[in-house]
Structures are given as structure tokens and as C-alpha cells.
Image (spheres, grey):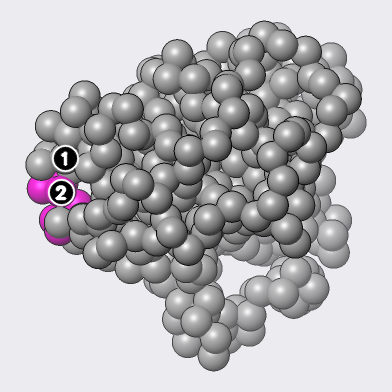
Amino acid sequence: MSETHLSTQKFADFPLHKEVHQALNEAGFEFCTPIQALSLPILLEKKDIAGQAQTGTGKTLAFLVATFNHLLSTPIPAERQLNQPRAIIMAPTRELAIQIAKDANLLAKHTGLKVGIVYGGEGYEVQRKVLDKGVDILIGTTGRIIDYVRQGVINVSCIQAVVLDEADRMFDLGFIKDIRFLFRRMPDAKSRLNMLFSATLSMKVQELAYDHMNEPEKVEIAPNEKTSKNIKEEIFYPSMEEKMPLLLSLLEEDWPEKAIVFSNTKHSCEKVWSWLEGDGHRAGLLTGDVPQKKRLRILEQFTKGDIDILVATDVAARGLHISDVSHVYNYDLPDDCEDYVHRIGRTGRAGQKGVSVSFACEEYALNLPAIESYIQHSIPVTSYDSDALLDDIPPPVRIHRKPSTHTRNTRDRSSGRPQGGQRNGPRRHDKTRRHS
């Protein structure tokens, strides 16, 4: 069993429908993660669960397998109409809904069940046309789902399975009234399979579960471990003047395949992005005011590898589910302890190794004690040689400058440098080495 298999439990050991088994096999899923191994035995007995698990633990596949299997095992209501989905999966953000839908389509190949996705910001009529044809499993954000419910485009009175994903984020974003609105229009909780997943099972999340579910069983994964053991954490103490040179030097040294740089404000993110672009990195910028179409395009480029580094605020990054992120850089330590956990949880997912690098600068160093208290361990401190930081850094680009036809943004990994510009020859990978 390779290190990416987090338990010895196999999907083949569960009494799933053959169509679900076939889809799992074709997608390459053999072993379960702990949340899957604990959740599926309960769900396959048609019992509700409230699961505590961080992102990257495999919870999406757990509730998708249970949902597909439940619909295949349960007769279709005789009174069901074309505009009545049989299952509904609610997510706090568009990006999370899109990722869930991608995973759901993998399982839908052999089942004959139709998957539909709805979310705000774009495509209202396009999404409506899909719904008009009928869907079995509806995935989406609560606001757009409610819009269609109120207009009679969809009716939730024949729902047989419900999933509420990242319930804690639902509270953070103020969506709980919407969720209760939808629950009140569904069949009684005892007549459907109910699943709730959250990074934390706070009292308000548990209250929501017990109000709208049928005596859910609580499933927890390593509740005392806020951060994954697969993530190597380290922290630097740079001066304000050395933060940017240190970041650029570490990026040159680490040469991450896919990295996310977090900063606390929109202005700071724009500054970081400008320096990265000026230094020849293929970087994308995600802040709260980035238009939805541009946001989705940037995420697609990052997923496909056309962009190597994503610079983001916490708000803009909520709900991001991108695989194979090798490094997370906290350019600023977050003000919220939970945001630290959410940030570094973007890497080291599903058994893979990840690296988290944080900067405790003069402005945000006071956030560190609370973060370390929350995660229940100290973050190893790493020193560096100031004289070894890059000193041939070009100026940042202007934030509103139109894309150039210049090849400055194409990184040539064979030479260890960006292409174009006036600087030739490899950078000093060895001299910026950390000193633990």
C-alpha cells in the first residue's frame, strides 16, 4: 500500500452497486481515506451523519458514493416530476460546487443518474435550460438554488438525499437562513438520507444538524490534530524590507510545481502579484473583487498548470479545491487562527506531502502565539542568510498593465530561470539554503 492510501479499507469491501464500483475502479479509487472508511458503513445503512473533517480528507467522495448508492437503492417517488431532483448537495462557494460536480460526473458515467450544477454570478439561463431537462442530483450554492426554487424552476419536495458541505463556512458567509429555507421545503428528515460535513462541529453546526437531520451519528477524524502530518511547516522572521526578497528567493530555491501565496489584504496581494510578475513568474491574482468569469479562468489556468503561483486573500480562496498544490506561502500571518489551518490545508492533501512556509514580520508576528496555541504545536523556526537573498530583482509590473506578448512570464525549468528580460544565467539556488 503506497503512502497515499490512508487506510487499509477498500471500496471493494463495501456492498455498493456494481455501477458505483465500476466508476470507482475506472477513476482509480481503490483504498478509502479515514473519513470514507468511517462514514460509508453508517451511510450504507441509511443512517445520517455529521462529519468533522478538513478539506483534502476525501469527504467529497464519501458523500458522493453514499448519495449515488442511495439513489440507486431507493425507488423513485411515483409522483416525481421532471423539475424535482432526487438529491441536493449544497456548497458555500461556486468553486467548491464546481469541484464537487466534476467528481460527481466521474461516478455518473455508468449509473444513468443526471448531475446538474447551479451557482451565482453567471449562466442563469444556461443553467436553467439544464434544469428544465431534469436532473437527479443537484449541486450548487444556496442562493442560486433558492432563486430557482422561488421561481418554480425546481421543486425540492421529492428530495431523497441531502448533503451540506463545509457547514462552518456556511455560517461564516451568512447562508444558514437560506439553508433552513430549503430544508423546510423538503420531505421530512426521516424520509431522506442526510449528510453534513464541517471542519469544526461547533455548537451552532450541531444545532443545525439536529434541527434538520434524523439523529445523525457524529464522525470525527483526528479532532485534536488541526494540521496534517503530511505538511512540513516552517516559519521565518524577516524584516519588512526583506519579506519580498525572501519570498522570491524561496520561490527560486523551492521551484514549486504549484503554489499558493496568501496575504491578508487586497492591496498586499496586488503588491505580491506585481513583484512575482516582474520577476518572470507565471502568477494569478485572486481577490474579492475579481470578476467571476476571470476568477474561473484563473483557477482553470492554475489547475492545468498554465499558472504556477496563485496569490490570494482568505475570502477569495474560500472553497478552493485544487489538487497537487505542493507549497503554501503565508506572506502575512493571518489574523484568524482557523484561517491558518484552512490555508495550509490546501497542500498535503489525500496523503500527499506538502510544505507550508510562513513569514512572521513586524506587522503580523503578534498573531503567532494564538495560532500556535490553536494548532497545539510550535512551528519550527528557520533562519536564512540575508546576504544570499536575490539582489537582481527587477521592478514590479503595474497592476493594470495589459498582458504583453513578451515571453517574460514563461518559466523554463530546465535552465532554472524565467525566459526573456536582460538577465541571463542560472540563479543562486544553493546560497539561499535555509538554516534550521
Q: Which residues are magenta?
A: 372-377
What secondary structure is found at the residue carrying circle 2? helix
In the picture, residue 133 is in which quadrant? top right
Q: Can see residue 242?
A: yes
Query: How busy is the neighbourhood of tag 1: few (under 14 within 10 Å), some, or many (20 plus)?
Result: many
Q: Quadrant of residue 67?
A: bottom right
Can you say whether 391 is above or below 427 in the image?
above
* Residue ID for mark 1: 368
Q: Is residue 83 left or right of residue 71?
A: right
Which part of the image, by quadrant, shows the N terminus?
A: bottom right
Return the residue nearer the eye: 222 or 125.
222
Q: Are discs 1 and 2 less than 8 Å apart at CB?
A: yes
Disc assigned to residue 372: 2
Residue 427 in percent (x, y) is at: 59, 52
The image position of residue 271, as x and y in percent, is: 49, 20
Mark 2 nearby-residue class (10 Å; few <14, some 14–19, many ≥20): some
- Identified at 21% across, 55% down, the residue is 381
- 304 above or below 69? above
